[in-house]
Each structure stands twice: as C-alpha cells, then as structure tokens.
Amino acid sequence: MAERSAFSVRTIPGFSAIAIFCFVAIYAPILILVTFSFNAGTSLAVWEGFSFKWYVAAAHNEQVQSAALRSLMLAFVAAAISTVAATMAALATTRTRHFPGRTMIYAMINQPLMIPEIVTAVALLIVFAWVKVVTNHTSMIYLIAAHTAFCIPFAYLPIRARLETMDDSLEKAAADLYASRWHVFSRVTLPLMMPGIIAGLMLAFVISMDDVVITEFVKSAGQDTLPTYMLGQLRRVVTPEVNAISTVVVFAGAVLVSIFFWVSSNRR
Amino acid sequence: MEAQAQVPVSDADPTPPADTSDPAAEIAIDARRISKVYRGEDEVRALDNVSVTIARNEFFTLLGPSGCGKTTLLRVIAGFEPPTAGTLWLNGKDITRLPPNRRPVNTVFQSYALFPHMSVANNIRFGLEMLGKPKKQIDEIVDEMLNLVQMQAMKSRRTSEISGGQQQRVALARALAPEPEVLLLDEPLSALDLKLRKEMQIELKRLQHETGITFVFVTHDQEEALTMSDRIAVMSAGRILQIGSPQEIYQRPAERFVANFIGESNFLDATLSGNAVTFRTGGTYEVERPADVEDGAVSVLLRPEHAILSSDPSALPATVETVVYSGEATSIHTRLDSGEALKVRVPNAPHSGGLPEQGAPVRIGFAPGALTVLKD
C-alpha cells in the first residue's frame, strides 16, 4: 500500500527512543508486579527471595476460587450473548439497503463507548435497585445483563469492520449459484466473517473479565468477581497474593490473544 | 404485453440472424423495453428502454464505454438488479421477478468472486450442491469441469494460492458446472495481461462451442468484441445504438458514435443528395443511402484501411503530414485541401518502398462501397 510515497515514520528523529520509552512505560510496571508475585516475603517493595507461596495461597483461597469462577462464567455468558447481538447488528447495518436512520443506529450502538463508565454504573444501580425491591430477585441476572450491554459495542466493532472489507460479490456469486438466502449466509457470509466474530467474542470476554466500576455498583452481596475481590483486598491487607492473581490473569489473556492471532493467520 | 411470436431481433437490427426457421424456439433471452433508474440526489438512467433478443447458443457481446449500462443490463439478466420497467424472458418464461438463485443463469464476475475459504474443487461443487444433485453425479461433473479448464492438478489448492489466469479458469468452471441456460461474463479478461487475454479469448470461444451454452459477454474492448462475438450490441448512455454481426458493426455502423468507438475512423463532412455525396473538397461519389437520413449535410465514414493512395485524377487531393510505421502497416496522416484530416492505412509489403514523404502532395481514393453515410 505504501507505493505512493517513500515516507517512513522511522526517519523521524528520536523515533526509536520514543518507541522504547513507550514500551517501557507500558510493560515495566507489569514486570515489577509479576516479579513481586514470586516474593517470599509479604512486601510489595522489598525482595526477600523466590517463592511460589502466594500462588499456592491464592489457589487455596476459597474467596478467590469463587470470584474467579464467577468472573469466568459471567464473562463467558456476557461475551456469548453480546457477540450474537453484535453479529446481528453488524449484518443489519452493513448488509441491508440504506434506510433512513441507519447512520443514527450505527452511532447509537457505539455511543456506550463514549459514555463514562461511572455514569452507566450509577444509572444501572438506580434502575436495578428499584427492580430488586419490586421483584425481590437478586441473582446474577443483573450482572449478566449489565455486562452484555457494555460488551456489545466492543464485539460489534471488529465484526462490522470485517463485513465492510468483505467483497459483497462473494454473496452475489453464492446467490447466483442457486444458494438460498440461508445458504448464502451459512456457507459464505458466516464462514468469512468468522475471524471478526472470534475477535469480537474475545474482546467482549476480556472487557467483561476486566470490569470493576459497573460490577462494583451492580453486584449484590456475595457476588464478587475477581477484579472487585482484588479491589476489596487492596483496601485491607496488601500481600503479593494480589500480584499472583494478576499475573495469572495477564498470562491467561496473553495466551488467549496469541491463540486468536495464530488461528486467524492460519485461516488466510 | 403479449408473449408470443416476437421477431428474433430488436428494431435496431435490420438483418435477422441466419436460418431461424422457428424463431420463438431459438430465443434464449428476450429483454423487452427494460429501464433501470437509480433515484437519488440526481436521477441516473442506467438503462433506457432497452430491447434485445439473444438467440440460443449465441456468443453475444454487450460493448460500450464505462457507464454505458452494459454491466447494469447483465445484472438485470442475472437478477441482481430488478428493472424499473420492462420485462425479461428466458426460454419463453417471464423471469423478471425471479431472484438470482432461481434463474438458470450463472455469472463469471469481473473480480472472479471465488470463495476464499474453499478449495478450487469446492468452489466448482458449490452450485451443484445448492441444486441438490446426488454426490456421485457432483463428483463426476466437478472432475469433468476440472479437465475442461485444465485445472485437475490444482483441485485441492486454495483459490488464493493460484494465479490470476487460473482463478479465471476456476471462475469459468464454477459457472459452467451447473449447466446454465445462459452464461454471463462481466469483463472477465480485463485483469489479465495481453498474452493471457488472447489465450483466454480463444479458450472462451472453445468452451462456448463445446458446451453449447449461450454466452452474454460484457466488454469495453472493441477488438475483443469483434474477435469473439457472433453478434454485438453497441451501447451508450443506457441505450443500444446498434446490434449486428462484427462485420455489420464494423463496416456499416449506424451512427457516428458506433463508428468512432469501433476501429479507426475518418469522418468527412459532405452533402447528401439522392444516392450521392459531395465532399467539401469537391468530388461526388455514389453511396448506399440509409433509410432514415434526409438530404443535406451528413458525416461520411471512411476507414483508414479502405482508403488508398491513388494516381486517379478524380481522387481527393491532400498533403502528407506524418508517416507512422507500425510493423504490419504504415499510417499516413494527410490533410485534405478542405482542411479536414484523413488517415490512410497501407499494409506493408516485404519490400515496401515508395511511400510518400512529409509535405508531399498525394491523391486519396477508395473502392466503391467504402463510404458509409452516418446519422449524427
């Protein structure tokens, strides 16, 4: 694509220095966090020898276990539902004839990205508090609903991007070759948009796993997720156990993203 | 509109194709007064009252510059674009409202539109599977198609792993496999280099001959159209200007646009009176008088290769301006005494010499019948 100009950002003075600084700024704190998760002592600042004890402690902590399980379940359900909704939304905003208000709908799907999370959290707190009083129902359904809602725009973006770059003559070719509308979708459109759907699913999963603010406001008693549990711990005693949990989460995320890149590059 | 007993050619074509004893049975496609209007900020009339009939087994070409409506007409036939007005008949059945997947018509797309997530063989299978053919029969047809386009060795490759020319062959095989009544080809050779394009032109003619399927071919390349077609429809601004065999289109263009678009042309101003024209530089010549042109000022077409350098005193006097050698022929650009430019194309003989030099006075003659009177 760069055939028109020979401009390269690498020729800008200080390019390498700036790039290195940015990487250090991003990864150095995480590296320190990971390092101290192996600390034998209880301090987050003084190294007292190598040990796996905080990993063992975290793994045996029942509160961590239940919070982790809850987080995974919540992220899985919310990501799945929001990806299905986002897929339908992406099809409706790219594979239909232009209708009045289509751009408006597109903007409305993305708007939650722009609304400060705390505003959504307060709004949900008020509405759900009212619903809880009326129905006397306090299950995970509120967290699932909230997470699904804020995950939709994140799942929507990669799916829509994929659909927009897809050659629509492929779908025409399928219809031309006697495929019904369902077969055009199931045999051509869906397989081709799969990398976008997987990207959307993973993005939604990670966003849900990561959420603190909305979860903190919406959860009922005993519904801590991993992030809200960690936040609660930090308010009391800080031990490298938090580091250990964080390290596992970071590692799991890295594995997930690597799998995605591996899968999507193999598909080409 | 009634369906029966249509003349097999449109009004624009004075000569029907040869030996049509039972005209109705020989017609594959019959487009009647088709219009396509895109409404938007400004209305675009992509097709303006187009009528055309395409005979079964014919290699029919829609030729015209970009934006002339040829691709729109192809899409209407494929079923991708519903016409704003008019009806479309295939083998005597009205298919105007039929969706693309229910028309026995297949398309070779300009971009090929091969399914990137399927192998070569699975691309060819697709249409057959959608038709619900038994697996054994599908395997046989796929095999046959792979042989037909000489892609047997590549059958398990991904479509992204084969060259442009090979993709072209797969796209053809995929569209031919379900044995459509009509094959539509949307500028399928435009992405290939010249040598490959020439090969594919011959290949397409062969495939059309072997399969006996009606081909409707869209191109903006006049040479391609002349080489490959049984009949050509020349289009401009959403209309069909002329339909005819390559010879008719080239030798007897109906309009100046057609003459200009196809081949090289000289246009001379003249006055028509009865069966003769008089040029501005003098000289009166007998012509075949078209029916719909009135006496008075007209344009006369003289193809450069139909003009000759002559010593006949009655030939048109001119002065040589440039001589351009191009291998098999030499083009002599001259200017008549009236100030009009006239190009003469002389084939090069093994020991050709004696061509006039720049500035030399010459006389330009032509064989009887070389002049065509055009309506402007």
Image (spheres, coloured by chain):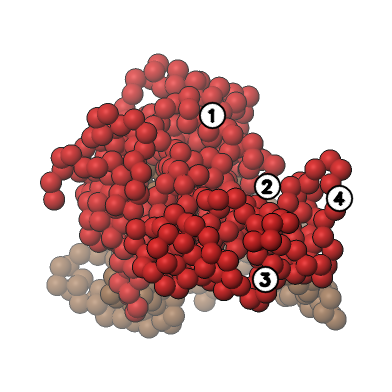
Chain colours: A brown, B red
Task: Confirm whether circles 4 and 1 share one chain.
Answer: yes
Upstream in the sequence, badge 3 or badge 1? 1
Q: Residue at x 61, y 72 (%)?
A: B281
Q: Is residue A41 visible?
A: no
Chain identity of mark 1: B
Q: Which residue is mark 1?
A: B206
Q: Which residue is mark 2?
A: B193
Circle 3 — which element? strand
Please give left or right for residue A239 compared with residue A13 in the image: left
Circle 2 — which element? loop
Task: Where is residue B61? Give x, y as percent.
Answer: 45, 46
Task: Confirm whether circles 4 and 3 share one chain.
Answer: yes
Please give left or right for residue B149 compared with residue B108 in the image: right
Q: Residue at x 44, y 21 (%)?
A: B141
Q: Which residue is mark 3?
A: B336
Circle 1 — which element? helix
Which of discs 2 and 3 lies nearer the camera? The answer is 3
In the image shown, does B275 or B174 lie closer to the viewer?
A: B275
User: Do tag 4 and tag 1 residues touch (Cβ < 8 Å)?
Assistant: no
Chain identity of mark 3: B
Specify the amino acid type for callout 2.
Answer: Asp
Task: Where is residue A31? Give x, y as percent.
Answer: 72, 65
Which of discs 2 and 4 lies nearer the camera? The answer is 4
Specify the amino acid type for callout 1.
Answer: Arg
Q: Residue at x 58, y 59 (%)?
A: B302
Chain identity of mark 4: B
Circle 4 — which element? loop
Upstream in the sequence, badge 4 or badge 1? 1
Task: Where is residue B109? Give x, y as percent.
Answer: 48, 47
Which of discs 3 and 1 lies nearer the camera? The answer is 3
